Amino acid sequence: MKSCIDTIQDYGLRSIGIGERLLPKSDFTLCEQFTLIGSGMIWNIYFGLMALVTGYFLAVTLALGKSASNPWARKPAEWFIFIFRGSPLFIQFFFAYFFFLSLKKSYPMFDMLTSAWAGALIVLFMNTAAYSAEIFYGALRTIPKGDVEAADAYGMSGWPRFRRIVWPTMMRLAWPAYTNEAIFLFHATTLVFFSAFPAWQQRGDALYYASYFADKTFNPFIPYPILAFYFILLTLTVVGVFGVINTRLNRHLPAERRAKMRFRLNLAR
Amino acid sequence: MFSYCADPDTLGTFRWFSCYLTNGVHLSFYMSFIKVLLLLFITAPVALAVGFGGAMATRAHLAPVRWLGEGYIAIMRGVPDIAFFLFFVIALDQAFEWTRHQVLCPDWDAPIRQGNDFLVCPAAKLPLSTARESIHQAYSFFLAVITFAIVFGAFAANVLRGGMRAVPHAQLETAAAYGMSRRQTFWRILVPQMWIYALPGLSNLWLILIKATPLLFLLGIEDIVYWAREIGGTKTSRFTDYPHEDWRMWYFLFLLVFYLSFTRVSEILLEKLTLRLSHGQATTGGEALRKEAAA
């Protein structure tokens, strides 16, 4: 009987290949399940965080593109957003994986794209960029026109006007919805290893390990609640961090005009 | 399918494809699209009904019922929906078998959970081990429908609750002033008016439901994702008359296009529905329609 500390040392970083190679085969202890599923969360956080940070920049660009009057900028942005929001993420993963696979066949240098850490990240990056772009676009259209007129009156235009007036207001208006998007992006990361992307050497995410335990023990009532526990924790963290940023974005406003953080659930992709 | 398909090796490109796309496995592939549509059209009303129940529960007088409704909605927020899909498929199956076991085999004394196994008496198995293959498929489809209804019921409950809250309070007060009971107010005043407020959320939910259908694959149903993977994979001439390379990319591209057009068509239809329901409503949309008619 191993103590729990040993289990954590063996399996705490199992999902990134550090520690014990072999997964436990039978007689799973509660500690093992907690540790391995928690270890899988590393992947969920990696995918979510990286996609969120990189996707943000593409999202702002796409939102600006969609609101541009020039069709050469508007049309591509509209199509990009439509394609990624109009189709299931699950199918996008499958398509991307097989696309990368055939790409690799012709050009071996694309080898890394068929592994989850790069390939799935690209899909998540583009997916969240499309969803966030729609949110930012909506915010962009509701910027009070007085703000922009005031900027014009001060002689601001182009980059300074965007940087100092349009962008901060857009962020402030979009932030509550963007928080939801971030939460659902983290939830969506659980799809990665259930689509075509292989979990190399059984290094999977939290749901991968949870379903491993459920399949082996034929008892879903322990691993899935553990997974739920981790995700509720993650969700609360995201809400907390985004709430701090929200407060900062709204700090110049009188208290009653501040955008309330409303937590809406509506996105399964 | 066609008479000239007898010897595929001799065919030109167009004829080869016309034969290839109508062979047996492809017909199963096309049938699986019907399966997806069937799931959608069964699940949508069921989920709506579950959601309506949930939303009603959150307005209940009795505190425990209210907590039940609130808890049901809240638990779906923090946890990824696909975890629920994977969970409910096993959990529901075991719940049904356990109940049947208790009813049908009261004398069975061996424990149900033996180590890593879940053992019920043979008479309680679902479906019975003697049942036909189609029964097995229908049963797993049935489980999928319930799973979808539970998960999307929570989403619908949240939307409908928002709709109920959005109905102007003066309407309810007027009803009370006319001496209507709570029940009468709910069914005659609140329910008919809430739909227009809930519609944007429900349209959104419908689009989300469409996009969730490929998750059927995870529930062990032979759906479009399953067939696209099966048929698309590399086939050598040893196993089929239609050898080809790895075409899975093209099959999934086709699915992508299918879903894109499906959501687009739905969007257009939902827009029309919104327009119709806006007639005579005290909303900006209804006001715009009234002005249009007057002009």
Image: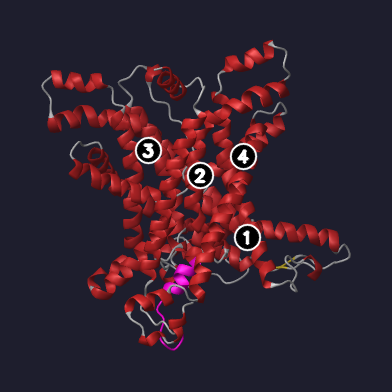
Q: Which residue is mark 3?
A: A178
User: Residues under labels 1 and 4: Cα distance?
Assistant: 21 Å
Alpha carbon separation for disc pair 3 and 2: 21 Å
Pointers 2 and 1 in contact (C-beta within 8 Å): no
Write down the residue under mark 4: B51
Q: What label does residue B141 carry, if any?
A: 1
User: Given the image, what chain letter belongs to the residue carrying mark 4?
Assistant: B
The chain containing the residue under callout 1 comes to B
- Which label's residue is closer to the chain start, 1 or 4? 4
Q: Is residue A239 magenta?
A: no
Instruction: Please report the residue visible at 33 percent of the width from the left and 33 percent of the height from the top.
Output: A138
Callout 1 crowding tier (Cα within 10 Å): few <14, some 14–19, many ≥20: some
Q: CA distance from mark 4 to mark 3?
A: 26 Å
**Residue type (three-letter) at the residue carrying disc 4:** Gly
Residue at position x 44%, y 57% in the image:
A90
Q: Nearer the viewer, mark 4 or mark 2?
A: 2
The amino acid type found where label 2 is placed reads Trp
Q: Earlier in the sequence, mark 4 or mark 2?
A: 4
**Secondary structure type for disc 2:** helix
Q: Quadrant of the N terminus of chain A?
A: bottom right
| Residue corresponding to mark 2 | B206
Q: Residues within 10 Å of mark 2 (few under 14, many from 20)?
A: many
Alpha carbon of mark 1 to alpha carbon of mark 3: how far? 35 Å
Q: Is the same chain shared between marks 1 and 3?
A: no
Displayed quadrant of residue A260: top left
Q: Is residue A220 visible?
A: no
